[in-house]
Every structure is written in structure tokens, then in C-alpha cells.
């Protein structure tokens, strides 16, 4: 009897800890003031100014820049300084794909093989017809590449798209690197950088243009994003932020085959324009994608632990209190690149943080912005707090089990 009660109490304790961490019990926002200037000031003093590299932060209210902050190690950075933004690239790539969907040139639910002539998925135990553009965008296609790309040191090393899809030589440590179906498509969520490299190939096949050229003409130029490109050589000729390690040493930027997954160059000013283009007050709301398409991208397509986490190319971070979600994307890559964008599409409020040389500083800043705005823990803040949550669960369960053992020992002595 005591063993059963002890087990139930331990399970209840773990459930309470999980719920408490997910709901932010005991947490306070970085500032109690609703003013963006107060948030920026608090974020600077508590988080932003503690790194050793470069950082650009822009806070947006109703589609308008309400304040910004820049930290420079070495050459100064500003609104037009380009950063390589790692997986934040995927959100922009998704816009390029959805532009082709709007034009009727891609069917979201057609097998991707429909659009491929240069490469095909390898044979396996699962039906590749279940691999659709929709599932690639939402990381539910059953791919097991585990990518993560580390990039190449020189242009001579860069693989072709077809070679990279077959076996990426620049796979991050621990990543399989081969784009293939390993679980039933549509059966679950599994983050796949290789899926976005496959989308890059589909864009080239359907549009008949190099991926970087298509994105420039169809997404960046219409949005007025003049400081944004997938072209490494072009970015190198601009005001390009130096890359720093966590120790503060400079590190050359890497080249990528997987442009759409990992190698967008953009500025804080341009990402603020991207956020503003999705605000209700945007003067040109349909410059690239219609409001209907943008709304479809925010619909949940994948969940974890009972929480909706992914739409079509965009992460769903937390409920916005208006029946929808705070959306956006993060990027994180070697040696210390971290980027984050959050947007409440109901209000046009958002934050852009691009940085090098910090330990997930951008993600922490953006997640704190979500908590400040909504009082909700966003999905990546929850992940970052998982270790502390586990410690609380184990410590509490250990004490409960110890108490149960003592109670059982005393009961046996009485008997």
C-alpha cells in the first residue's frame, strides 16, 4: 500500500513540476513595464551585453521599429550589417516554396517525386509517395538525416545538391547526413535540415533558376530586403559581421551547399522589414504571399508533449492569447552563431536578434520577449529549462521515495 501511494505521489510531483515549468510558475518578465524601451533596457543589462561577439537586436511594435541595440566586438555592426543566420534561413525558404504554391506550380500534397528529375529519394521500407512538400515544410516527412550542417571552409569543397542529399560531407557531429525515409511519413515530427535541402532542389527544378536567384527575385526584392542574399560571394562584398567563437576569437564564415537550410545572409533591418510585412498594418500585405497563405503557414502541423510546435516553415512558440500563436524561427550553428525572430501576427509586434559569439543569447532574448508579451513560456525556453526541470523532478521524487521507505520501515517495526 505504501509503495503504491509513494509511486502515485512521485508521479503527481513530476506532473506538477512539468506543468509549473511549462506555465512559468515562479518566473518574472525581465521588466514589468509594457514599454518597448523598458524591455530593451532590461534585456541589455540582464542578457544582451554579456557576450564576446556581435549582436543586433530590433524590437517592433505594430510593424514599426520601436527600438534597437547593437553590440560590436571589432568592426561595428548596425541595422544594415549582414549576419549569416543558420536555420533562420528555413523560414525564408518556406516563403519561396509557398510562392510557387500560390502560383499553382507546386501542390503541397503531391509526392515530391513529381517535381524531381535530378535526384530521387533512395528506396526504403516506407512509401516515398508520402513525402510531400507539406511534410517537408513541417518536418513530418519521416526523414532521418538529422542535419545540422557544419559547412565547408572553401568553395572547392562545396558539394552539389545531389551529392549533399545522397550524403552530406559537412554533416554536423552526430548527424546521419543521408536524406532518406526512415519512419512512416506523416507519423510524427523529426527536425530535418535535409528536408529543406530537398525543398531547395524542388525550387530549382520548378522555377528553372538557381535557388539564390529565385529567392532574390521572388521574395527579397518585392519585400525591399536589399541586404539579404543566399549568395556567399555577394554577402562577402557587403558590410558583413565577423563571426566569433564563444571564447571571443574570430572564425571564418563557412560555405554551404544547403543554402535554404542554413546559409541565408541578412541584416537586422531587413528582418524587421520581413516582420513588418506580416503585420496587420502592413501597407503592402500581399507583396509576396497572400494573407490566406500566411495564415495557412501558421496552422499547426506538428506537436510535441501535447503542444503545437510547427506550422509550414515556421515554429509555433506559444499561444498569443488571441486564438493563434507567436511564430518565427531560430538558427544555431558552429562555432557560435545564434539567431532568433518572433512575431505576433495578430498585432505586428516582434523581435529580431542576430548574434555571433554568444551561447544561445539570441534565443534567450527572443524567448524573454515572448514571456514579457504573453506571460507564456515559449517552446525553446522550455527546452532550455529542461535540465533544471529534470533536476527538480529527480530531487523531489527521490525525497518522496525516501519518505516512503522510512514510512514502510516504521510500519513494519510497529507490526
Image: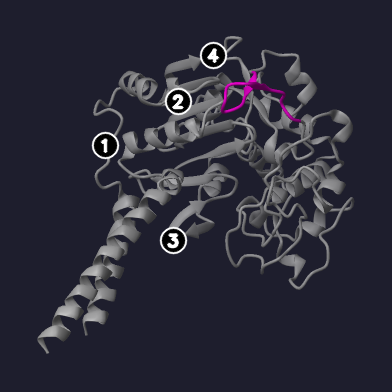
Please tell me how crowded label 4 is: few (under 14), some (14-19), or many (20+) other residues with Cα within 10 Å.
Answer: some
Residue 161 x, y percent position in the rendering: 84, 44
Residue 83 x, y percent position in the rendering: 63, 23
| Secondary structure under the numbered disc 2 in the rendered image | loop
The C terminus: image quadrant: bottom left
Q: Is residue 376 above or below residue 146?
A: above
Which mark is first along the chain, 3 or 2? 2
| Secondary structure under the numbered disc 1 in the rendered image | loop
Distance from disc 4 to disc 1, alpha carbons, whole Å, reads: 29 Å
Judge whether residue 376 is colored magenta: no
- Looking at the image, the residue that sits furthest to the front is 413
Which mark is first along the chain, 3 or 4? 4
Residue drawn at 75 percent across, 18 percent down: 236
Q: Which residues are magenta?
A: 242-254
The answer to whether 237 appears left or right of 37 in the picture is right
| Residue to which mark 3 is pinned | 305
Q: Is residue 263 above or below residue 237?
A: below
Distance from disc 3 to disc 1, alpha carbons, whole Å, reads: 24 Å
Distance from disc 1 to disc 2, alpha carbons, whole Å, reads: 26 Å
Residue 72 image label:
4
Query: Which mark is nearer the camera, 4 or 2?
Result: 4
Amino acid at each position: 500500500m505504501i509503495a503504491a501511494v509513494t509511486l502515485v505521489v512521485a508521479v503527481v510531483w513530476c506532473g506538477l513540476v512539468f506543468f509549473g515549468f511549462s506555465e512559468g510558475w515562479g518566473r518574472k518578465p525581465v521588466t514589468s513595464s509594457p514599454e518597448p524601451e523598458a524591455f530593451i533596457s532590461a534585456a541589455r543589462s540582464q542578457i544582451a551585453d554579456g557576450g564576446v561577439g556581435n549582436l543586433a537586436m530590433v524590437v517592433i511594435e505594430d510593424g514599426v521599429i520601436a527600438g534597437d541595440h547593437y553590440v560590436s566586438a571589432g568592426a561595428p555592426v548596425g541595422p544594415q550589417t549582414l549576419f549569416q543566420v543558420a536555420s533562420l534561413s528555413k523560414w525564408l525558404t518556406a516563403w519561396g516554396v509557398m510562392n510557387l504554391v500560390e502560383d499553382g506550380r507546386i501542390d503541397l500534397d503531391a509526392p515530391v517525386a513529381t517535381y524531381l528529375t535530378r535526384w530521387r529519394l533512395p528506396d526504403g521500407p516506407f512509401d516515398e509517395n508520402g513525402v510531400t512538400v507539406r511534410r517537408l515544410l513541417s518536418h513530418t516527412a519521416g526523414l532521418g538525416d538529422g542535419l545540422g550542417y557544419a559547412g565547408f571552409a572553401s568553395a572547392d569543397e562545396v558539394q552539389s545538391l545531389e551529392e549533399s542529399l545522397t550524403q552530406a560531407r559537412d554533416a554536423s557531429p552526430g548527424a546521419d547526413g543521408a536524406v532518406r525515409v526512415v519512419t512512416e511519413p506523416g507519423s510524427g515530427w523529426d527536425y530535418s535540415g535535409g528536408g529543406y535541402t530537398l525543398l531547395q532542389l524542388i525550387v530549382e527544378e520548378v522555377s528553372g533558376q538557381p535557388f539564390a536567384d529565385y529567392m532574390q527575385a521572388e521574395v527579397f526584392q518585392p519585400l525591399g530586403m536589399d541586404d539579404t542574399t543566399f549568395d556567399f560571394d555577394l554577402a562577402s562584398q557587403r558590410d558583413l559581421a565577423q563571426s566569433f567563437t564563444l571564447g571571443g576569437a574570430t572564425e571564418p564564415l563557412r560555405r554551404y551547399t544547403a543554402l535554404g537550410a542554413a546559409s541565408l545572409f541578412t541584416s537586422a533591418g531587413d528582418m524587421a522589414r520581413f516582420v513588418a510585412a506580416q503585420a496587420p498594418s502592413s501597407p503592402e500585405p500581399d507583396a509576396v504571399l497572400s494573407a490566406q497563405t500566411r495564415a495557412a503557414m501558421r496552422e499547426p502541423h506538428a506537436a510535441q508533449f501535447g503542444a503545437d510546435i510547427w506550422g509550414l516553415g515556421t515554429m509555433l512558440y506559444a499561444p498569443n492569447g488571441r486564438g493563434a500563436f507567436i511564430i518565427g524561427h531560430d538558427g544555431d550553428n558552429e562555432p557560435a552563431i545564434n539567431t532568433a525572430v518572433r512575431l505576433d501576427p495578430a498585432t505586428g509586434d516582434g523581435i529580431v536578434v542576430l548574434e555571433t559569439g554568444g551561447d544561445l543569447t539570441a534565443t534567450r532574448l527572443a524567448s524573454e520577449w515572448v514571456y514579457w508579451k504573453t506571460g507564456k513560456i515559449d517552446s525553446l525556453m522550455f527546452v532550455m529549462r529542461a535540465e533544471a526541470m529534470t533536476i527538480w523532478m529527480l530531487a523531489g521524487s527521490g525525497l518522496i521515495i525516501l519518505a516512503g521507505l522510512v514510512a514502510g520501515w516504521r510500519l513494519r517495526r510497529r507490526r
